[in-house]
Amino acid sequence: MNLKGLKSGERTVLDHVFWANGISRDALASASAFSKTRANAAVAELLEQGLLEETGEQVPTGGRRAETLRLSRHLGVLIGVAVGATGLEVGVLSPDLTVLAHHSEPANVGDGPGPVLSRIRALMRELLAGCSVAPRQVIAIGIGVPGPVDFDSGQLVSPPLMPQWDGYSIRDDIAQDFNAPVFVDNDVNLMALGELWRRQRSLQNFLVVKVGTGVGCGIVCHGQVYRGANGSAGDVGHICVVPDGPRCHCGNLGCVETMAAGPAIARMATDAAEAGQSPMLARLLAERGGLRLQDVAQASRAGDMAANQVVQRSGALVGQMLASVVNFFNPSHVFIGGGIMRVGPLFLAAVRQSVYHRSLALSTRHLDIQYTPLGDRAGLIGAGVLAMQESLRNMEAV
């Protein structure tokens, strides 16, 4: 992607077109605070350079026909990677974040960076070949990982769920096969970026909470992802909710992650099955040799009382943690994602009840708590947003 020598106005136009996910010339002039003459001149130059393209026709509003502008697909492609504690997803995306190809599979980050990243590089090559795209056409690569990241270096810093990755250079590893720039961030930060893009930056202050193997939080403050001084902002999984609870892998007692995340839900459900409180959970335990979050979700959706109690207990504890965060940050929205979404509305209801009960009235007066609309694709889309956003930020201008 040749972005050298762009004028600052052209760079601003590209940025607005990307975040708008399709925009008319008139709307672009308004959003960029440019005159129509200046905006049209920049658009004409970018169309000439092949950096923008016109597509389709907007909803008719009278007057002359209006084309929608978007980033040109001739720019190349983005690669997004969402690494979780127990799985990974790799996708090829166009510059406007249309998913062209993707693949997900189970994975264990505990295996270490060598085998996991080797598999990711192989999937990147396979997906690009399936799209008939050469590696040199990759604009940038965005990668989300389940741990605190020093964003400038792209390295994980003492990640509790993946200690073997501490200080490992993911960028250097990926560079074995690709020359494109690689951007690495915490997985929940990327989910927050995905929501920010989906809402076209219309929400300025919100949270995205991921509940899966662990619990994490992405923070958007004044329209930007907030990472903190060292990249660990949002590590809410280690907020204590039960002072005399079991020891967390971080070394402390009663963290919400060890009390309410996926493994804790499975543990509580296993206890219920072994105590004879649920024939359904007992049958699943016997069939599979162990219970997982998705098994508890299945039982809960089927109306199993013990499973529902486990789900409600988890939701109440996550809500207890969130109440403190809501009082502190006062977000307009809280989006919840991760494996917990399989459970359905019962978990969400328990979170809401706990947050509304424990938070100040002013903090919750207009608070909206819901599952992330991007669903299972939140991490992948967010990785694409990171790759494109940083590419636009880092372009040279004159």
Image: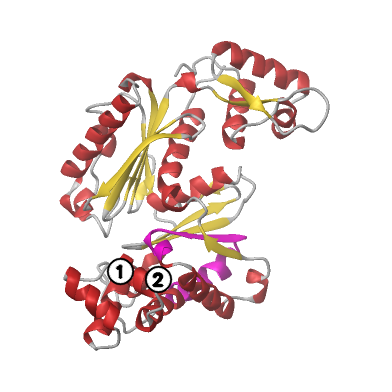
Alpha carbon separation for disc pair 2 and 1: 26 Å
At which x and y percent is residue 57? 68, 27
Image quadrant for the N terminus? Answer: top left
The residue pinned by badge 1 equals 295
Residue 320 is a magenta residue: yes
Residue type indicated by callout 2: Ile
Side (left or right) of 175 relative to 388: left
Q: Residue 257 carries which label?
A: none
Inspect the image, locate mark 1, and give the three-letter code of the amino acid beneath it. Asp
Magenta-colored span? 317-342
Residue 327 in view, yes or no: yes
Q: Answer with the quarter of the image where residue 58 lies.
A: top right
Asked if the stretch drawn in magenta spans residue 79, the answer is no
Q: Which of marks 2 and 1 is in front?
A: 1
Mark 2 lies on residue: 239
Residue 315 image point, x, y percent: 44, 74
